[in-house]
Amino acid sequence: MEESQRIQKLIAKAGLGSRRQAEVWISQGRVTVNGEVAQLGDKASLATDRVCLNGVELPRLEDKQYYILNKPMGYVTTLKDPQGRPTILHFLQDIKVRLFPIGRLDLNTEGLLLLTNDGELTHSLLHPRHKIPKTYRVKVSGQLTRSAQEAMEKGVVLEDGMTAPAKIDNINTSGKNTWFDMTITEGRNRQVRRMCTAVGFSVSALKRVRMANIELGDLPPGHKRKLHLREIQKLKQG
Ligand code: URA
């Protein structure tokens, strides 16, 4: 069990500010421990206490885990596959707790997958009301036409109805292919591929590079990393 520590130290370790800054926040009454306004010198443990700065709880370290995985192509986003295909569990063998993916990527999509055992955060991020932006790097063959781009930016009619507008940027055409970033705020099944198909382009590679405030960066395929406390905090704030 984690020992109690001075609250300014917990805040600093969470990456929210320096210890000195945290002392100022404590003296301004902006920090609470289990609902009571904290005093300078108070100690707490993130394993057992609810410590809040400006009403937002610092992540409890002992029981909640937050990772991103760069899912390679060829792995299903489940922990068990009835068809016996390789699953993302392959990359999680060394983690003691059971983590669940927040959302899914297709078998042939690679990129950023958030994993956690924080059910509340999962539920909140997947709730359509929150419209969490997800950015994909998309490769299509041919040159993306202005009309196809505009159609996706307006919203496209699919079998399950009209999509919300997508944001398209960073368009690069090289040789026979075009790459672009597409940001969507819904989480429909195979949405990026279906939107591209609907405007006449077939996706030949798809990689999720960002979800909410979390960036894939240069994490290699098949590798994972823990989220930084600051990233968790921001994710929870929405
Ligand atoms: N859109 C898709 O088409 N596939 C994914 O895996 C994610 C979004």
Image: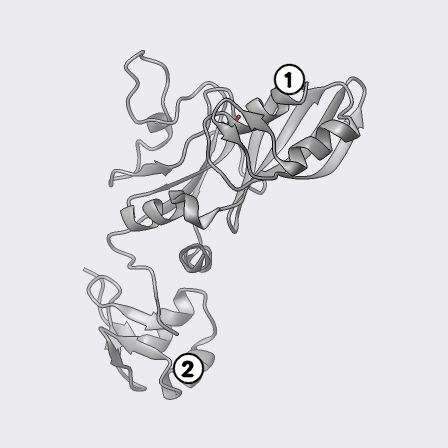
Q: Quadrant of the N terminus?
A: bottom left
Q: Amino acid at mark 1?
A: Ser
**Which mark, residue 25?**
2
Question: Left or right: where does residue 122 sit relative to residue 16?
Answer: left
Q: Nearer the viewer, residue 64 or 145?
A: 145
**Percent x, y of residue 199:** 67, 22
Seen at 31% across and 11% down, the residue is: 83
- Tell me the element at label 1: loop
Would you name the residue on which mark 1 appears? Answer: 202
Please identify the quarter of the rendering in which residue 122 is found: top left
Seen at 50% across and 29% down, the residue is: 161
Q: Quadrant of the C terminus?
A: bottom left
Q: Residues within 10 Å of mark 2 (few under 14, many from 20)?
A: some
Q: Nearer the viewer, residue 113 or 164?
A: 164
**Percent x, y of residue 188:** 46, 31
* Numbered disc total: 2
**Which mark, residue 37?**
none
Q: Amino acid at mark 2?
A: Trp
